[in-house]
Amino acid sequence: MQRKNLMLLVLGGVLGSGSLTAVLTGQTTAGEMSAHVDAVAGKRLFERHCALCHGIDGKGGRGPALNRSKLPRAPDDAALKGVIADGIPPNMPEGWYLNEEDVANLAAFVRSLSKIPSDRAVGDGKRGALIYAKSACSSCHIVNGAGVGYGPDLTGIGDRRSAAFLLKTISNPGAELPEDFLFVKVTTSSGETIEGIRANEDSFTVQIKDAGGHFHSLRKQELKELRKLRGETPMPSFEGILSAAELQDLVAFLASQRGKQ
Amino acid sequence: MRLLCAVVLSAVISAVSFGQVPFERIVDADKEPGNWLTYSRDLLGHRYSPLNEITSENVANLKVKWAYQFPSPRNEVSPIVVDGVLYVSGPNWAAALDAHTGRTLWTWNRAIPKDYRNIGFGRVSRGPAVLDDKLFVATLDCYLVALDLKSGAELWNTKVGDYKLGYSMTMAPLAIAGKIVVGVSGGEAGIRGFVDAYDAKTGKQDWRFWTIPGPGEAGHDTWAGESWKTGGGPTWVTGVYDPKLKLLYWGVGNPSPDWNGDARKGDDLYSCSFVALDSDTGKLRWHFQFTPHDTHDWDAAHTPVLFDAQIDGRDRRLIASANRNAFYYVLDRETGEFIAGQPYAKQTWTSGLDSKGRPIVLPDSVPTEKGTLIWPNANGATVWFSPSYSPQTEMFYVAVREIGSVYFKRDTEYKVGTFYAGGGEDELPPDDSWGEIRGLDAKTGATNWSFKLLSPPWAGVMSTAGGLVFSGSDEGNFYALDARTGKALWDFQTGGPIAANPISFTVDGKQCVAISADRVLYVFGL
């Protein structure tokens, strides 16, 4: 094989098909799918290729939840097939290994996910907005352009993360950090210490954003030490600081952040 | 645009001469180090430039001389340079560029059929070949095309394989005396691989060597039942040639299906092997299989390196390779005899090699339903991109990928022209993988030095008589290392991932270095 971009490449899997029949009734929500598509086969492909990021049930994880009637990048089935085949650089890999039938089956399964209830937040989003402000979240995060971009931008976080994931992260921020998130500490040749979030890195340089929002671009050859603090984050846990109800309200506020529609 | 090209052509034509390239010029490439006449510059696969204007003392002064924008992303081309003209190729296109400025002199295109599918690889071209008055391009839809060197006019095309069966070509053809040699992709589509030679003047096929022996041929019994018919063995990386022995050396890729070997019990010859072929007839002289009955997709699709050295007091003609399976091998290139081998990267699938160079495979090192963690990953400890051999340092330089994978095995059924892999892999995350450029003792494979890269690389290596090693990173760095120590001496951020081989040539007597980085071809000079 010449080159693979995918985390997992499996065709011809023999997973049990499960009982999808009820869920898949009326699977062609956009009314474009061929009568020959096989969403059960699509489910097998989804579990092998897509579940790693979108969740085994399509409710989201590293990638966005797909159990929605409207997918911003795939307003119709042609667009959905295009996304499956071509990916969305740089995060979603292309599906070069899928033939047209596979793509159609996968698209049918993804459309069927809209029949699955979404993982809804149970709190009150309006109260959550007040808690977001009171807890000084905006001193590290940006929502719709407001705040400081030390931590990840939370605009549209409701599209990217499930309510369960958000609750886990607020309670235990280090439990499952974003794939490209890295907290680093460096010591320069002059003895200066800089710590912050890695904005970028290549084999010769590293770019760091500190808590004040300042960027530092450094050549590795000129550093005494570059420590990569895997699994660590400057974000504190809010468990014990906020009540259980407040945590759910904050989750509801974040889950409502859908970005520009 | 045509008008613009015509205007540019007329403006520079007086300064550009389209040279003829008889085979003797390629054999004697060292006599004209300012050109780059074949994929690896010489027929021996060295990717070594005798130019020495750029050295460890002045390499820090390298600057961009010009840049050329490709029409598509992720270009993997290794250009050909003839007398002030660069020839580049991409997916079903080629162009001639003025080496002084990077401006286009002519372009050629061939439509990619709408039902063409690239199964297991990207839509790329790794370079053209030149012989006499023609440029040769291998296309995705599996045609070998001859173009007029001066105008880009198509002179002939020959169908090499049927893309509807999964055959394709991404490699740079190899020009030898009167012949153009090509190999095919399709190891994930259940093809039956081959190496072909075509008459350079007419495009007529001279010979074909099937990489999977048919009934009655030696090696056929290494395949169970009918599995040989869809057994893979692609030949998708450019080989090398010894003009004195008149032997071609070519790497053969994985058996199909990749990760499930149940239906093809046996060694599966000549998958994952080097084959030595008589260049007049295509007959097999010898073979050496690196990974018998492969179930990890460890193609031997590498450009071999030919060099001569004394082994135990005897002068030997050698062939060397850092294989995808993480072992470095040295063989006798007249006989295929195993001489030396050792790991050059992390591997967890063997306890070593036996006295014949056959791997001693550990139990629990094959793909399973639940998954098996093994180093290296399916892309291997190195891949298609070229290594380099420097006669100055007698070192073999290789870009190394330190990454493992969880390998899965699945049932699979062959369907014509579709993905036929029988499993897959789950790569370890970026935090647990990295890259290195290693300088190995060419005779033994012992590591003399290593230079660490952030990510597993996709770029080849070029060494020079200036005592330098050039390569690129997946994060876009193009850089130069000291060939004797591995010390970093210069780097430039190109802005795009580098998945190509560097070359070096001269313009008006001044040394240049070129690399393709995603959408841009950069040319550097002092």
Image (spheres, coloured by chain):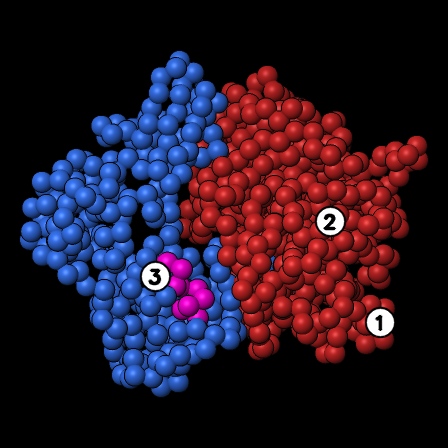
Chain colours: A blue, B red
Question: For the residues marked 2 and 1, what is the alpha-carbon distance in whole angstroms?
Answer: 32 Å
Instruction: Give the residue furthest to the top.
Output: A190
Identity, as a three-letter code, of the amino acid under mark 2:
Ser
Mark 2 vs mark 3: in front: 2
Image height check: is B262 above or below A253?
below
Name the side, left or right, on which B338 lies relative to A66.
Answer: right
Q: Main secondary structure of the magenta part?
A: helix
Subunit under mark 2 = B
Q: In this figure, which residue is indicated by the disc labeled 3? A: A54
Please tell me the numbered disc located at residue B217: 1
Q: In this figure, which residue is indicated by the disc labeled 2? A: B351
Q: Are marks 2 and 3 in contact (CB under 8 Å)?
A: no
Q: Could you tell me how many numbered marks the image carries?
A: 3
Residue A118 % position (x, y): 22, 67
Name the side, left or right, on which B9 lies relative to B268.
Answer: left
Instruction: Give the residue furthest to the bottom.
Output: A35
* Residue B24 counted in the magenta span: no
10 Å crowding of disc 2: few (<14), some (14-19), many (20+): few
Residue B201 % position (x, y): 73, 58
Q: Residue at x 73, y 55 (%)?
A: B361
Q: Is residue A192 visible?
A: yes
| Mark 2, secondary structure of its residue | strand
Q: Residue at x 58, y 44 (%)?
A: B401
Name the side, left or right, on which B157 lies relative to B395.
Answer: left
Q: Residue at x 53, y 40 (%)?
A: B434
Residue segment shown in magenta: A45-54
Residue A126 % position (x, y): 6, 53
Instruction: Give the residue furthest to the right.
Output: B314
Q: Are marks 3 and 1 on the same chain?
A: no
**Badge 2 or badge 1: first in the primary sequence:** 1
